[in-house]
């Protein structure tokens, strides 16, 4: 059978699922927030959300490991329009309840299609529309959706293939090895010796949670990370509670307070890293068990905020250490043995369960194949427009939040800019908008999407060659801090670098 015949047969086996004005990919925090903005700003436009998983929530649905919780305060991680009620740090199930409220209040349930995995996306300039090839993961049915505008809100995790280094001898290990992104429902760690490999945000969460019932939990790290013992309930929230203020007031006051705190941390990390370094180290020193080698185990080799700071609600990680339920070892793995791991120093750590909290891989735009007018899109050769559109890709926006601030702070700003773009299209009678380099940008250097001197955790560095690029001038830059974006994005020129067409 010829290739053309095969393609034609495939098309005939695909069901036409209809057309919408806007197609959103992903029903996590970004997708649900985007749907709210569409509903509020463009009530007459049709839209759908396609979600590959069986329920809403994205990360908060897939992360089932013990203690899974936010590592950002919920007053800034929550939406601008929807007051957060409760402690500043909360478990994943509380965040899902919050998202459920948004879905219910905005009437979004009928607009979400679960178990709909997007397998290909193609733009046609002749038709002025996107076509999404979709597989129903519950039935295997093949569907085809079309849309005037595509909004990618799938996040950046590759949920199906988390990152695990290759260590010698893992096949000899007689215990159980699990990755937090694929946590098994039947894992019982009560009374067991647990080894957690890694010292990032996940380890900071898993260690104190498992230490509650485990015989002992050891966190093994190659090098230290920065930690900050944030209070679960902000002292200002405690002061405001007797005043019986409206939820909206409390939300806005605490939101602004946390924004100011995060701005200070980010700015100080760049302008006076030694001051922030000393602040972070001295903050945790009194919380550590007496005799802890702070230099070895808790003094990082990098500048504060070059990687994420591990936020520890009420210092629960350090409490587990003081109680003798958890400990930290700084060394490298030489090999796995039948009973645990042998370190480069020769020390052996025995374990019944090994948790590989070693990070994840990025999946640019969900690793979905893109084509424009029949040609494959290589995102690694494209440039971002203000961190929300991609050069040469028409009628497509994407949601990407902050690494140092709460993700959602930026998603709200992105929604505002895209809303202005859609309004401008309607005013101009345009059916297309595409970022195009200006004549003066022809010789612009293409820079990594993340400058290693600015932000360089492993999951970012491993994905540099796969991600889109940025330039050395506006509007082709991104990865700015919130104090920059909140001033610049609301006033951004939506004709500079964007071409509108009929």
Image (cartoon, helix red, strand yellow):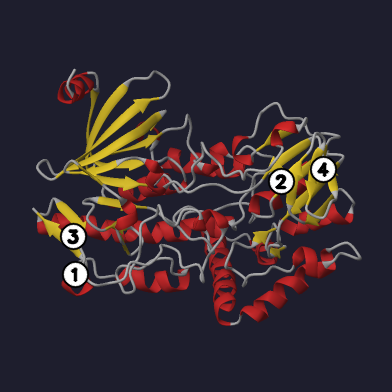
Observer-side mark, 2 or 4, equals: 2
Observer-side mark, 4 or 1, equals: 1
**CA gap, disc 3 and disc 4:** 55 Å
- Element class at badge 1: loop
Q: Where's residue 161, x and y in %?
A: 52, 38
Question: Mark 1–mark 2 contact, CB under 8 Å?
Answer: no
Q: Quadrant of the N terminus?
A: top left
- Element class at badge 3: helix
How many C-alpha atoms fall within 10 Å of the one at disc 1: few (<14), some, or many (≥20)?
A: few
Q: Where's residue 259, x and y in %?
A: 54, 68
Q: Which mark is residue 438?
A: 1
Observer-side mark, 3 or 4, equals: 4
Sequence-earlier tag: 2 or 4: 2
Q: Which mark is residue 206?
A: 2
- 164 over 485 or under it: above or below: above
How many C-alpha atoms fall within 10 Å of the one at disc 4: few (<14), some, or many (≥20)?
A: some
- 459 over 496 or under it: above or below: above
**CA gap, disc 3 and disc 1:** 20 Å
């Amino acid at each position: 059978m010829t290739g053309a015949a095969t393609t034609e047969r495939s098309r005939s086996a695909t069901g036409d699922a209809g057309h919408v004005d806007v197609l959103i990919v992903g029903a996590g925090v970004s997708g649900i927030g985007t749907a709210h903005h569409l509903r509020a700003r463009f009530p007459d436009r049709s839209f759908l959300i396609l979600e590959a998983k069986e329920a809403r929530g994205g990360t908060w649905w897939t992360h089932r490991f013990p203690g899974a919780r936010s590592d950002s305060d919920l007053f800034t991680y929550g939406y601008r329009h929807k007051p957060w009620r409760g402690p500043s740090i909360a478990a994943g199930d509380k965040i899902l309840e919050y998202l459920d409220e948004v879905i219910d209040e905005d009437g979004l349930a009928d607009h979400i299609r679960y178990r709909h995995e997007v397998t290909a996306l193609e733009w046609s300039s002749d038709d002025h529309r996107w076509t999404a090839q979709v597989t129903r993961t519950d039935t295997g049915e093949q569907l085809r959706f079309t849309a005037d505008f595509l909004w990618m809100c799938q996040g950046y995790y590759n949920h199906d293939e988390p990152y695990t280094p290759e260590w010698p001898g893992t096949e000899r290990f007689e215990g159980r090895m699990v990755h937090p992104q694929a946590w098994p429902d039947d894992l019982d760690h009560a009374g067991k010796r647990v080894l957690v490999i890694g010292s990032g945000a996940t380890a900071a969460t898993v260690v104190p949670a498992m230490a509650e019932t485990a015989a002992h939990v050891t966190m093994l790290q190659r090098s230290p990370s920065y930690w900050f013992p944030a209070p679960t309930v902000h002292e200002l929230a405690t002061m405001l509670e007797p005043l019986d203020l409206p939820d909206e007031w409390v939300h806005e006051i605490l939101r602004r307070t946390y924004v100011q705190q995060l701005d200070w941390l980010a700015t100080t990390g760049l302008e006076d890293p030694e001051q922030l370094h000393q602040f972070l180290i001295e903050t945790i020193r009194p919380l550590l068990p007496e005799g802890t080698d702070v230099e070895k185990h808790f003094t990082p080799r990098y500048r504060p905020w070059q990687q994420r700071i591990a936020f520890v609600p009420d210092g629960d990680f350090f409490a587990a250490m003081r109680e003798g339920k958890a400990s930290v070892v700084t060394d490298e793995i030489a090999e796995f043995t039948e009973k645990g791991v042998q370190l480069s120093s020769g020390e052996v750590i025995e374990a019944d369960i090994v948790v590989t909290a070693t990070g994840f891989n990025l999946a640019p735009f969900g690793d979905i194949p893109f084509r424009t007018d029949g040609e494959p899109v290589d995102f690694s050769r494209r440039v971002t427009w203000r961190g929300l559109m991609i050069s040469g890709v028409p009628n497509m926006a994407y949601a990407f939040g902050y690494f140092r601030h709460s993700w959602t702070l930026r998603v709200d700003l992105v929604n505002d800019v895209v809303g202005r773009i859609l309004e401008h299209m309607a005013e101009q009678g345009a059916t297309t908008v595409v970022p195009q380099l200006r004549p003066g940008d022809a010789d612009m250097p293409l820079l990594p999407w993340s400058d290693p001197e600015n932000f360089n955790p492993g999951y970012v560095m491993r994905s540099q060659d796969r991600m889109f690029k940025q330039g050395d001038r506006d509007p082709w830059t991104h990865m700015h801090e919130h104090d920059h974006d909140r001033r610049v994005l609301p006033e951004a020129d939506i004709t500079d670098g964007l071409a509108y067409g009929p």
